[in-house]
Image (spheres, helix red, strand yellow):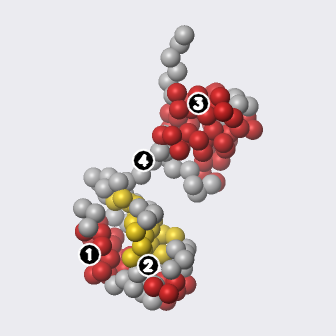
Amino acid sequence: MEKTRYPQVEMEIRKWGSKPSSLIQVLHGTQERIGYLSQNVLEYIAERLNVSLSKVYGVVTFYNFFKTQKDADHIIMTCMGTACYVKNGEEVIKAIEKYLGIKMGGKTSDGKFSLRIVRCLGACGMAPVMCIDGDDIYGRLTPEKAIEAIKRYQ
C-alpha cells in the first residue's frame, strides 16, 4: 500500500468525499488538523478533489478563516470597533507595532507574536481592548498597559 503524502488531507477526504463540492469541508478539516494550509497542501487538495488550483486559492483567499501561514505562538487581536477607535485604540496599536517591530497583520521574526485587527471583541465598556490567544482580554488599555500585558507572554 502506497503511503500518502498528507494523511491529514486523506482523513478529511474519507470523511467528506473526493468530489469538488467537498472543497470547503476538506480545507476546513485539514486546517483544523495541521494548523494552516501550505502551498503544497493546497496543491495536493486541488489534485485529489480534481479542482483547479486557482479555484482552491479563490476559496482560501475569499474566506478569512483560512490561513496559509503557520500562526505565531501568541495571537494578539486588537479591537478597532467604534468604542475602541474613539478611545484611542489607534495609539495602542501603534505602540504594539513599535514594541514588537511589526505592522498590523504581521508576525515577529521569531514567530512568537502576530498582530491582527478585529472589529469587535464584545467588551466595548472596557475600550480600548485587546485579546491574546483568544482567551485573555485586556481592557481600558493605554499604550503602556498593552506593552505590559504582552511582556507576560515573552
- Number of the front mark, 4 or 1: 1
In x, y percent, where is residue 96?
33, 72
At a point 44% along the width and 78% down the height, the residue shown is: 129
Amino acid at dot 4: Lys
N-terminal-most mark, 2 or 1:
2
Q: Is residue 61 above or below residue 127?
A: above
The image's mark for residue 70 is 4
- In the displayed structure image, the side of residue 154 where residue 107 appears, left or right: right
For label 1, the crowd category at 10 Å Cα-Cα, with few meaning under 14, some 14 to 19 and many 20 or more, is few
Question: In front: 74, or 115?
Answer: 74
State if disc 1 and disc 4 touch (CB < 8 Å): no
User: Which structural element holds mark 3?
Assistant: helix
Cα distance, mark 3 to mark 2? Answer: 39 Å
Picture layout, residue 91 above or below residue 114: below
Residue 119 in the image, given as x and y percentages of width and height: 55, 74
Tag 2–tag 1 contact (CB < 8 Å): no
Q: Earlier in the sequence, mark 3 or mark 1?
A: 3
Q: Amino acid at mark 3?
A: Met
Crowd around label 2: few <14 · some 14–19 · many ≥20 (10 Å): many
Q: Earlier in the sequence, mark 4 or mark 1?
A: 4
User: Quadrant where the N terminus lies?
Assistant: top right
Q: In this figure, which residue is indicated by the disc labeled 2?
A: 129
Q: Seen in the image, is 15 located left or right of residue 73?
A: right
Q: What number is the disc on residue 11?
A: 3
Label 2 and label 4: CA atoms lie apart by 25 Å
- The amino acid pointed to by label 2 is Val
Residue tagged 1: 148
Residue 87, located in which quarter of the rendered image?
A: bottom left
Q: Earlier in the sequence, mark 3 or mark 4?
A: 3
Kind of residue sitting beneath label 1: Glu
